[in-house]
């Protein structure tokens, strides 16, 4: 055996998978088509965003690397949804397209137990029972106990600009040819997906006076809990906002038949939540304008990313479209937009551990799973790496529940509900988002990260100290009652509250709008002796102010956990199970859920089917 784990692909999924395996002490090989493109950001050079920012924090708490890399060279850091509740607040950082991948490449090339090799994998080594290695285009073969495929948007990829169609990967790279048809020859079903990217424009050719500035958010913001250095907001690079014009819309409508999307050239399904600009004009014909963000790509380049303007139009039409935008009358193109079509694997082919059901030893992660986005890819790569290693170590797999992490929501959505389009994580997909917040990712996941060996003892002990201090603070607030003291009355009067009558519990007072923990600490000596930083204080305030809502979600989650704890024997006969609806039988046979909870979330499995399942599982366990 040459290696314990082989990772195919050096994108965000591949790097996280390789790092996880190597950090756990397993001899790992990462094969990349181009080492200098590992960690590349072929689309938007940003990390985070709605739900995605929380995923990056979860990756950090499980021992992944994306958060640390994102904190290292950001151009701008922003907290989103600050006007809304804590359940949807999250970070988004504009990254340096040059420095971000260089940082990760340097780590990959200097990580113990990790070997990086340039090459293209065209087929797998396997017998009739399992996969045990890879074959490269130059004929070289490498064996392993596990193989993780993280091919991104490279498998049989094609680039589209109008009628100009080329066999290319993202950013003009070589496509991965041969592997996809080989997977199909193994009985693994693939699906054709599409995504795209907007044009890049020279900064000095844009009139920014016609755009509104979009600065970062002040404060010590970071994805990783270990980050201690922050870039002041005044030193960050701003983004800008403009809108499409009626002229832009007219040009697009006039040339619609030339778009690869609308000419029939593209057969792959595109992402619903990141459509091309021509799709927006057609699908939202009543909208007079669409917002576009002007985002810098690097400190070392003049390139501006025109977010929201993805297109598959011919280059000459792209020029007309861009020149119709305010401030872009004299815009100079550095790179034309394109659509890209690629192969992914159908979600029914893999299970919650991301291992292919038919082929033990073969795992997949990232966009090959049917997802879109760097953050989703990184999370899947980390989980595939962890589960491949746990299987090698003959340990139970790590399957995160829907109330534990957005990562758990994503994987459960993919393997239970499936997807017919590139899947994107959003906060609306999570039913327990108030207990899966940006601020408490460490409370949810660091113990798991430590248990699987990716969080150091030192970091874990620091976390335990923080957890104990938060609990100590909540306890002090619960048992302390504040009454008629001049300074207390003065503070609450300044906030517009009536005179306090008798003693009021400090925790109840903290629930009031505008009341701050730091101020209450001035009245409660015990709080002054508790070592909490600004982030610990924020967590205490959220716990207090949303106590009732959090308790309700925890109760709902416990009800779900009961169903998750009911394991379904994989030998169970759905087809001959009396009382199951026909559609439920077909879906259950196809997906083979691991638990009653997972089965209950499958489309086509109704509550009555779930009841029948529970009875049969109890009957089966009674006979064992």
Image (cartoon, helix red, strand yellow):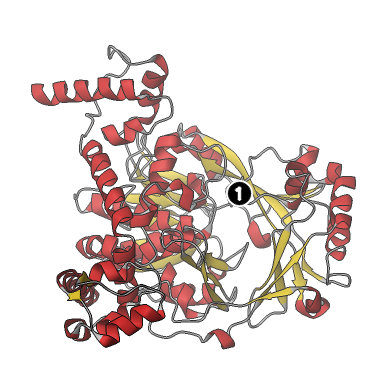
Where, by quadrant of the figure, is residue 464 drawn? bottom left
Residue 471 left/right relative to 56: left
Residue 491 spot, x, y in % from top left: 34, 82
* Picture residue at 69% right of the left edge, 80% below the top: 301
Pinpoint residue 265: horizontal percent, then vertical percent: 76, 40
Inspect this view and state whether residue 503 appears: yes
Q: Residue at x 36, y 62 (%)?
A: 58
Q: How many marks?
A: 1
User: Is 71 situated above or below 433?
Assistant: below
On the rendered image, what quadrant is the N terminus found in?
A: bottom left
Foreground residue among 167 and 402:
402
Q: Which residue is mark 1?
A: 273
Nearer to the camera, 167 or 70? 70
Give the vertical position of 22 relative to 621 (above or below): below
Specify the quadrant that holds the C terminus. top left
Give the residue at x 50% y 85%.
Answer: 231
Q: Is residue 388 above or below residue 528?
A: above
Q: Nearer the viewer, residue 161 or 181?
A: 161
Q: Is 60 or 125 nearer to us in this picture? A: 60
Question: In the image, residue 409 lies at what x, y percent?
Answer: 39, 47
Q: Quadrant of residue 576?
A: top left
Q: Secondary structure at mark 1?
A: loop
Badge 1: residue crowd in 10 Å (few <14, some 14–19, many ≥20): few
Q: Would residue 375 be found to the left or right of residue 385 on screen?
A: right
Q: Position of residue 607 (x, y in %)?
A: 33, 25
- Can I make out residue 29 in this image? no
Horizontal side of 535 relative to 624 (left or right) equals right
């Amino acid at each position: 055996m040459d290696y314990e784990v082989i990772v195919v692909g050096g994108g965000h999924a591949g790097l996280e998978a390789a790092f996880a395996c190597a950090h756990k002490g397993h001899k790992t090989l990462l094969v990349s088509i181009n080492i200098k493109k590992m960690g590349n950001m072929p689309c938007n050079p940003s990390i985070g965003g709605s739900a995605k920012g929380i995923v990056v924090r979860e990756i950090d708490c499980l021992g992944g690397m994306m958060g640390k890399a994102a904190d290292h060279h950001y151009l701008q850091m922003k907290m989103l949804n600050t006007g809304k509740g804590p359940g949807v607040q999250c970070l988004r950082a504009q990254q340096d397209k040059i420095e971000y991948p260089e940082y990760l490449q340097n780590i990959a090339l200097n990580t113990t137990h990790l070997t990086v090799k340039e090459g293209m994998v065209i087929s797998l080594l396997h017998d009739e029972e399992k996969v045990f290695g890879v074959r490269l285009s130059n004929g070289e073969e490498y064996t392993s106990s596990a193989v993780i495929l993280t091919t991104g948007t490279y498998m049989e990829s094609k680039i589209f600009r109008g009628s100009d169609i080329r066999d290319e990967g993202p950013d003009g790279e070589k496509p991965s040819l041969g592997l996809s048809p080989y997977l199909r020859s193994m009985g693994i079903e693939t699906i054709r997906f599409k995504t795209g990217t907007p044009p890049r424009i020279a900064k000095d050719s844009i009139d920014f006076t016609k755009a509104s500035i979009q600065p970062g958010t002040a404060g010590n913001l970071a994805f990783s809990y270990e980050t201690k250095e922050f870039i002041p907001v005044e030193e960050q690079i701003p983004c800008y906002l403009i809108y499409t014009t009626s002229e832009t819309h007219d040009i697009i409508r006039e040339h619609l038949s030339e778009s690869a999307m609308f000419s029939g050239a593209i057969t792959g399904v595109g992402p619903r939540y990141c459509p091309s600009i021509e799709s927006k004009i057609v699908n939202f014909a009543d909208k007079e304008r669409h917002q576009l963000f002007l985002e810098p790509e690097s400190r070392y380049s003049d390139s501006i990313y025109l977010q929201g303007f993805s297109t598959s139009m011919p280059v000459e039409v792209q020029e007309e479209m861009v020149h119709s935008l305010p401030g872009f009358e004299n815009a100079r193109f550095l790179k034309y937009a394109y659509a890209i079509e690629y192969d992914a694997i159908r979600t029914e082919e893999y299970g919650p551990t991301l291992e292919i059901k038919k082929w033990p030893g073969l795992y997949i992660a990232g966009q090959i799973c049917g997802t879109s986005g760097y953050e989703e890819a990184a999370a899947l790569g980390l989980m595939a790496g962890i589960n491949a290693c746990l299987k090698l170590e003959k340990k139970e797999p790590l399957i995160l529940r829907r109330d534990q992490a957005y990562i758990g929501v994503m994987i459960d959505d993919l393997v239970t509900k499936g997807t017919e389009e590139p899947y994107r994580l959003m906060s609306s997909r999570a039913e327990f988002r108030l207990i899966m917040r940006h601020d408490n990712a460490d409370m949810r996941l660091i113990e798991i990260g430590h248990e699987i060996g990716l969080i150091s003892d030192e970091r874990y002990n620091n976390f335990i100290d923080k957890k104990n201090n938060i609990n100590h603070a909540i306890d002090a607030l619960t048992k302390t009652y504040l009454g008629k003291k001049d300074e207390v009355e003065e503070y609450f009067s300044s906030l517009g509250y009536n005179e306090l009558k008798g003693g009021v519990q400090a925790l109840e007072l903290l629930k009031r709008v505008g009341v701050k923990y730091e101020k209450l600490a001035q009245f409660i000596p015990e709080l002054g002796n508790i070592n909490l930083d600004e982030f610990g204080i924020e967590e205490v305030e959220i716990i207090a102010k949303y106590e009732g809502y959090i308790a309700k979600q925890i109760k709902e989650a416990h009800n779900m956990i009961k169903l998750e704890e009911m394991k379904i024997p994989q030998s169970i006969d759905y087809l001959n199970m009396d009382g199951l609806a026909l559609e439920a039988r077909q879906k259950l046979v196809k997906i083979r859920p691991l638990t009653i909870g997972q089965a209950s979330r499958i489309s086509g499995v109704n509550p009555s089917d779930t009841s029948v399942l529970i009875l049969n599982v109890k009957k089966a366990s009674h006979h064992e």
